[in-house]
Amino acid sequence: MNRDQTFEFFRRLAELNLSPETELEFGNTYQLLVAVVLSAQATDVGVNKATRALFREVTTPAQMVALGEEGLKAHIRTIGLFNAKARNVIALSEILVRDFGGEVPADRDVLTTLPGVGRKTANVVMNCAFGAETFAVDTHIFRLGNRTGLARGKTPLAVEKKLDKAVPGPFRVGAHHWLILHGRYICKARGPECWRCPVVDLCGWKSKIMEKGAKGASTKGAKRKKP
């Protein structure tokens, strides 16, 4: 995808959704960090269900530490890997209280030193909380980057770096939200809805599915062309 096509790709997505946001629910930066940590290998819908009551009770790292690991587990048992996630959330909360005055640092490298916080999580926090031009490559963005030709790469980091080079200025802050939402609801892993895609003519994927409910050859092609 060339520079002009990339600009048009994001222009169309932006036209349909001027202010894209994460679908995770949170009230402050600390709650955002916790929600993103909990969202690993889980859906935003499932995380939101688990955190609504939790976030009414806990708004700061100190309150999370006071709640304790078992208290946190009671809130998040419906989320996958909840035992490990509870340990990480309590541990990172203790570090925030001890080393950062209870505040979430606005530094990606520092964030990735916290338990349970990888590069993708740090990128989400930097973007959503601090307006940084970061690209959090989840499974949706990895698939979409490769499938469309927007940013092909063999690893999430490779796709992230290509997006960083390719995404034009006006769209850099919102880019990863537009891509996640597009991958979640239109450019799906199975049965991508190319027939209603606003950027289908810019997409480099050869096995497009141009009819609603189409199966057979197109679907087989989709499987061959993963991600």
Image: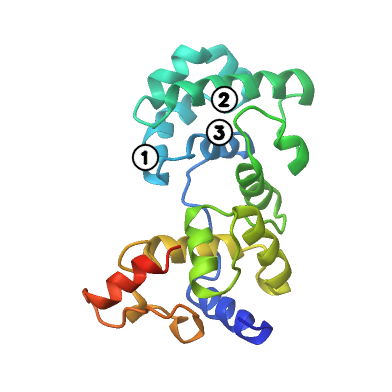
Q: Is residue 142 above or below residue 97?
A: below
Tell me the residue at 46%/51% (across/down): 23
Amino acid at circle 3: Val
**Circles 1, 2 touching at the beta carbon (< 8 Å):** no
Q: Give the mark, 3 or 1, whose residue is nearer the N terminus.
A: 3
Q: SS at mark 2?
A: helix
The residue at which mark 2 appears reads as 89
Residue 46, labelled with which disc? 1
Side of 75 relative to 132 (left or right): left
Q: Give the mark, 3 or 2, whose residue is nearer the N terminus.
A: 3
Q: SS at mark 1?
A: helix
**Circles 3, 2 touching at the beta carbon (< 8 Å):** yes
Residue 159 in picture, x, y percent from top left: 62, 61
**Front position in the image: 176 or 145:** 145
Whether residue 20 is visible = no
* Neighbour tally class for label 2: few under 14, some 14-19, many 20 plus, Cα within 10 Å: many
The residue at which mark 3 appears reads as 34
Side of 147 relative to 109 (left or right): left
Mark 1 → mark 2, Cα distance in angstroms: 17 Å
Amino acid at circle 1: Gly
Of the 4 image quadrants, the one containing the C terminus is bottom left
Q: Is residue 130 above or below residue 169?
A: above
Q: Is residue 92 above or below residue 221?
A: above
Residue 21 in picture, x, y percent from top left: 53, 57
* Neighbour tally class for label 1: few under 14, some 14-19, many 20 plus, Cα within 10 Å: some
Of the 4 image quadrants, the one containing the N terminus is bottom right
